[in-house]
Amino acid sequence: MQNLYWFIMISKRSDAELVLELCQELEVPRLYSCLANGTAKSQLLDLLGLELCEKTVHQTVVTHNKLHELISALEWKLHIDLPGQGIALAIPLSSISTKKSLDFFAGGHAEDEMKEKEQVHPRQMELIIAICNKGHTEDVMECARAAGAGGGTVLHAKGTAGSEYAEKFFGLSLVDEKEIIYIVSKKDTRNAIMQAITDGAGPGTKAHALVFSLPVSDTAGFRFYDDTAPVHAKNDFVN
């Protein structure tokens, strides 16, 4: 059976329809898209000539073969590797609940033979996820940037249930409106960024940010950035 991945692509909101059309062309069975915003400060937006940093986050489960078809298509047809066009990343899944769920996401291709794809310059990247109270994204990002992070992408969410434990020990009500921040980071800067967020915007602060990270196995949208460049250069798109 093929390996499975949670695939995330962050595009300009104006390119959302193009991404959808591409996924339909490649017969990606399911695609979940939501509106999001970048975290660039207004000075940076003015410098780049941008009025508003609007993004769309596209997410789905894909097989090994479909993942590499998607990445190749995004690079060749949407030019995702050009600065400002978008980024994509894949997170390995450890399991899936049922055979029906597998077929739902794999579109009948889970048993296909896996195609080999050589990674010329494999990157040790991580996806840092911070969940904070609404209106405190910039508090989180100021801490993250001080530790070497660049930009992030913000999704708006709301919890579904409260927890007496969470309220007692963290001062956190899960039913409040939240902001979920995605930050792509080099693996060797992950711990510093997470610690900075926890220290400056974590439980006990108004932001009440909870932070964790996930390993990233494949990426797109970083090819034209030298691996020695600072993290913020690699994250310019999601600013």
Image (cartoon, rainbow, N blue to C red):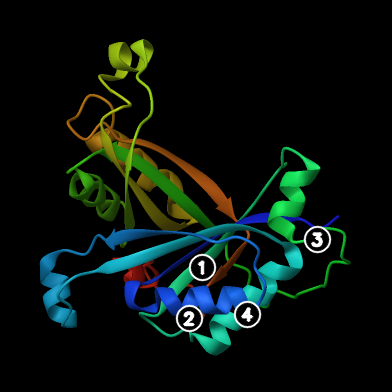
The local secondary structure at tag 1 comes to: strand
Q: CA distance from mark 1 to mark 4?
A: 18 Å
Which residue, given by chain and number where applicable, does mark 2 sit on?
Answer: 80
Percent x, y for residue 79?
Answer: 48, 86
* Residue underneath mark 4: 25
Amino acid type at mark 3 = Gly
Looking at the rendering, in which quadrant would you find the C terminus?
bottom left
Q: Nearer the viewer, residue 101 or 143?
A: 101
Residue 53 percent location from the top left of the image: 23, 69
Q: Secondary structure at mark 3?
A: loop
Q: What residue lies at 76% left-to-right and 45% top-to-bottom?
A: 100
The reply to whether callout 1 and callout 4 are in contact (CB within 8 Å) is no
Q: Nearer the viewer, mark 1 or mark 3?
A: 3
Q: Earlier in the sequence, mark 1 or mark 3?
A: 1
The residue that label 3 is drawn on is 108
Residue depicted at x 72% and y 46%: 101
Q: Residues within 10 Å of mark 2 (few under 14, many from 20)?
A: many
The amino acid type of the residue labelled 1 equals Ala
Amino acid type at circle 4 is Glu
